[in-house]
Amino acid sequence: MTARKRFYKTVTVTDDDGGLVVRLDDRVVKSPAGANAILPSRELADAVATEWDSQGEEIDAASMPLFSLAVTVLDRVTPQRVAIIDELVAYGGNDLLCYQDADDPELGTRQARGWTPWIDWARASLGAELVVAAGVMPVAQPAASLVALGQAVTTHDDWELGMLYRATTLGGSLVLGLAMLRDEMDSAALFETAFLDELWQAERWGSDWEAEDRRAGIRVELDQTHRFLGLLRAGGR
């Protein structure tokens, strides 16, 4: 793919009738679907503007993660909110935390220590009583628990929902995604908890560079998601 040349000199944030937008010279930045990229907080808009202003002679989309997250919300999350919620509840019905090792006592103990507090948190804070299985055979979660998880998800607006979807799909756990959204853990804790099994295996048997690179990439994406949330909420939004 041919890199796009930088076509603008100045980057500003303006508060138009529709809300906060980033302007490249006098042109409003748009999403890939063609909508004006209206941003919900000044801090987020300023950070996105900085990403655009930091481009060199060629525009590197990979160096603008906040803008990428923002337009994903605008173009994919908002138009598909109901489907996104349904998919998240499905993650909750098969949550990573509900499958603990029955064959390796050391790993099982580590899982119980790292995961049971979040199973307890889901029950106490979300009203979702989750069944924990020993092994990998699927376990059906109570209908009332899935309803409770759905209610927890729907309390978040499209911007937070987009970050919840990102965190959940990266970590494989709706419970941990909700915990991060509700400031019960940060991205580093979510990563360590979600990848407890892999990190234990790497500690015990070693790890190849491909697995290390994959985990490092996920860690960066979780950090970006957490940063986006902070910018989203800054200024008392």
Image (cartoon, rainbow, N blue to C red):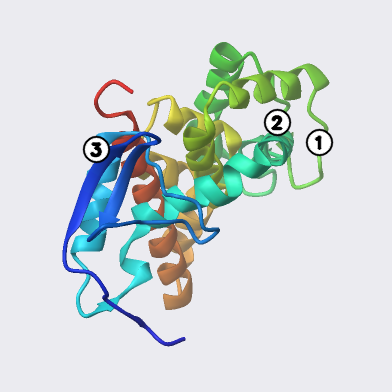
Mark 2–mark 1 Cα distance, whole angstroms, equals 8 Å
Q: Which residue is located at x 46 percent, y 61 percent?
A: 204
Q: Amino acid at mark 2?
A: Val
The spot of residue 108 in percent (x, y) is: 59, 41
Q: Amino acid at mark 3?
A: Glu
Q: Nearer the viewer, mark 3 or mark 1?
A: 3
Q: Is residue 102 left or right of residue 192?
A: right
Is residue 67 in view from this perspective?
Answer: yes
Q: Is residue 162 left or right of residue 57?
A: right
Q: Residues within 10 Å of mark 2 (few under 14, many from 20)?
A: some
The spot of residue 24 in percent (x, y) is: 26, 60
Q: Residues within 10 Å of mark 1 (few under 14, many from 20)?
A: some
Give the label on residue 139, or none.
1
Picture quarter with the C terminus: top left
Q: Amino acid at mark 1?
A: Val
Looking at the rendered structure, the secondary structure element under dot 2 is: loop
Sequence-wise first label, 2 or 1: 2
Q: Which residue is located at x 16 percent, y 62 percent?
A: 10
Q: Is residue 210 left or right of residue 237?
A: right
The spot of residue 92 in percent (x, y) is: 68, 34
Q: Which residue is located at x 64 percent, y 13 percent?
A: 127
Q: Is residue 63 above or below residue 181?
A: below
Give the label on residue 43, or none.
3
The residue under label 2 is 132
Sequence-wise first label, 3 or 1: 3
Looking at the rendered structure, the secondary structure element under dot 3 is: helix
Sequence-wise first label, 3 or 2: 3
Mark 3–mark 2 Cα distance, whole angstroms, equals 41 Å
Q: Is residue 117 left or right of residue 184?
A: right
Q: Is residue 213 above or below residue 84?
A: below
